[in-house]
Image (tube, rainbow, N blue to C red):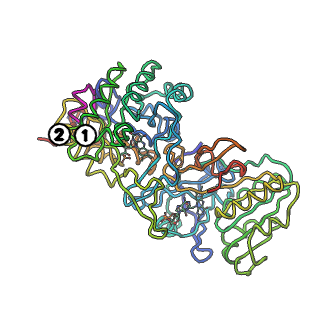
Amino acid sequence: MSKLFAAEVVSNTQVAPGVFKLVMCEAELARLARPGQFLNIRVSAGTAPLLRRPISVHWVEGDNLTIIFQVVGQGTQLLAQVQSGGRLDVQGPLGHGFNTQTSGQAILVGGGMGLAPLGLLAQTLHRQGRTTLCLAGGRTAELVQASGGSSLAGLGLPVHYATDDGSLGLNGLVTELLLRELPREAVIYACGPQPMLREVAKLAQEHGIPCQVSLEEHMGCGVGACLGCMCKTAMPQGKEYYQRVCTEGPVFDAAEVVWQ
Amino acid sequence: MSKTMSEINLRVNLGGIELSNPVTTCSGTYGFGAEYAAYVDPSELGGIVVKGVTREIRPGNPMPRLAETPSGMLNSIGLQNPGIDAFIADYLPQIRALETKVLVNISGNNEEDYAFVARRLSEAGGIAGIEVNISCPNVKCGGIQFGTDPVMAAQVTRAVRDNTQLPVIVKLSPNVTDITAVARAVVEAGADAVSLINTLLGMAIDIQRVRPVLANVMGGLSGPAIKPVAVRMVWQVAQAVPVPVLGMGGILTAEDAIEFMLAGATAVGLGTANFVNPAAPREVVQGIAAYCQARGIDDVNKLIGAAWK
Ligand SMILES: Cc1cc2nc3c(=O)[nH]c(=O)nc-3n(C[C@H](O)[C@H](O)[C@H](O)COP(=O)(O)OP(=O)(O)OC[C@H]3O[C@@H](n4cnc5c(N)ncnc54)[C@H](O)[C@@H]3O)c2cc1C
Ligand SMILES: Cc1cc2nc3c(=O)[nH]c(=O)nc-3n(C[C@H](O)[C@H](O)[C@H](O)COP(=O)(O)O)c2cc1C
Ligand code: FES
């Protein structure tokens, strides 16, 4: 069950140009958060911007939760200015996260800021003793590490990298790394930009591998009340219908998603 | 003599519906009542108004449906809902169990739709009243909104009135030149109360994509940005009609809510505020009581229209 918290900000540091790592302390929230879930954060006490900002839980350690975010506009700019020692108005944890009750090897595929939610997933799978392979993509070595790559590696999990500039691992796309691993008995967990997710979903389908994808949408309420954050889905060959990214998602079975 | 909080009467009567306090939540922003129950127990509220229901299932508009604007937001949800039969079967049982007054918001493409949905809801029972959303386009009349024409607004109101014994609240559109004309027309046609304002028609353009932000091009503006317009319209309507007014539009805090009551609202609705601060409805109830206490006011009804004099 989600709640409102005034979480204590432990630290907020720039870990790469425009990328921030914020650690907050809130025991109950840390206990409740599941992989793939997100927090809806009020970034302004006033009305500019008015709406909360959805940010994934990246990491949980004891009573502390970590988020990683990229400054892309006014809201994340304000979040970047939050000082340690202050309080953050956090609603959460929200959404339907990754299902970890799966079997076989877990392949985690993350692109850019999409690496962030894979952290808590990797922690959970690691604790379960699951064989896990991480594929991490991004623009540069620095950004891939800052967006969550270093957390994955820190767990001692094998991580293969792909960067746009070749500064770390393959000079190319994370989906090329995935293709190299297929086919195999596995389950794919993916988060990243739409084009990447669409390609991952396609590869998973071609190789008959179950795949869970975490999607993003602009949100009004974050709790399922406004119907503003819809994703078009369909049962195989079935009728198309909308589901709420904030409630039925953000994690969906890739086979259900009708890609735009 | 100053009153303690518990001695202050917060009960109000909204067109035959006894509310334990003047604070309600707005249709379309509160789901079917359960979504926000973890933040504010519905029993702490005067009432809630659930998402608009239509005769048939409606899939809603294409995405994107939301755009954030200065101190506000645009939405073009497109009345996505499961249709009246599925609503009654799948949602009404849990809604009835909520310990608060529940109003169901209804919409339609023509008078028959409104009449049908009102009749089905009355037969089903267990709700406190019906809020009639007349801000939807009339398919027969080429898409003109019922709410912009006093004659059509009155026809819809009568169609609902003739098909239910429940209190009928008609929700007025602000997208008109003279809102009092529509208000008078629906009251003459049998409305027990009026609610206002619905969203203001607006739009936003993405200058990078060089396209409207909303897939539906236009949408409804809500949030603090519309509050002064809403206060003005409540002020006008409350003095023009003899029935109670449910005031809404940009209320975030108790101060905002008190402003609406002083303008003439008997009760208030919080919509977009829930997205910003899910605890807002509770804070507004407490804040209204605190305001009364600080001023030695023993009955919240004394606030209604107090700014007129
Ligand atoms: C479930 C979920 C989890 C997320 N997790 C993270 C995370 O862990 N780290 C992170 O950095 N970001 C995450 N995001 C994206 C983050 O919410 C947006 O970047 C943020 O809201 C932008 O706010 P802003 O005011 O800075 O930018 P705005 O000024 O609002 O927008 C700047 C740009 O970002 C785009 N944008 C804004 N909001 C969203 C959104 N919700 N989804 C997609 N694009 C958006 C806008 O279209 C615009 O192009 C997540 C989004 C969702 C829905
Ligand atoms: C996402 C959203 C959905 C809405 N859906 C409905 C609806 O189904 N029926 C209706 O009468 N009003 C609907 N409204 C209008 C609100 O009930 C309310 O009148 C308006 O938002 C102004 O109040 P606010 O500024 O407090 O949000 C909706 C508003 C929003 C933001
Ligand atoms: S953000 Fe409101 S329903 Fe998802």
Within 10 Å of disc 2 (Cα), the crowding (few <14, some 14-19, many 20+) is: few
Residue A7 image offset from top left, x and y in percent: 54, 56
Regarding residue B79, the answer to whether it shows in the image is yes
Instruction: In the rendered structure, find residue A10 and report the number of the disc placed on it.
Output: none
Seen in the image, is A11 located left or right of residue A189?
left
Q: Is residue A123 magenta?
A: no
Seen in the image, is B164 located left or right of residue A235?
left
Q: Give the range drawn in magenta.
A: B183-193
Image quarter where the N terminus of chain B lies is top left
Image quarter where the C terminus of chain B lies is top left
Instruction: In the rendered structure, find residue B306 and report the number of the disc placed on it.
Output: 2
Seen in the image, is A108 located left or right of residue B103?
right
Question: N-terminal of the two: label 2 or label 1?
Answer: 1
Q: Ligand 2 closer than 8 Å to the CB at disc 1?
A: no
Mark 2: which amino acid?
Answer: Ala
Q: Which of A66 and A61 is in front in this view?
A: A66
Q: Is mark 2 on a helix, strand or loop?
A: loop
Residue at 88% in and 57% down: A184
Reading the image, the residue beneath label 1 is B261
Residue B173 image offset from top left, x and y in percent: 30, 42
Q: Spatial distance from mark 2 to mark 1, Cα to Cα?
A: 8 Å
Specify the quadrant of the image occupied by residue A18.
Answer: bottom right
Is the residue under label 1 in contact with that under label 2 (CB below 8 Å)? Answer: yes
Count the marks: 2
Within 10 Å of disc 1 (Cα), the crowding (few <14, some 14-19, many 20+) is: many
| Image: A131 above or below B78 | below
Mark 1: which amino acid?
Answer: Met
Q: Does the magenta stretch include residue B185?
A: yes
Q: Nearer the viewer, residue B142 or B65?
A: B142
Q: Nearer the viewer, residue B117 or B252?
A: B117
The chain that hosts pointer 2 is B
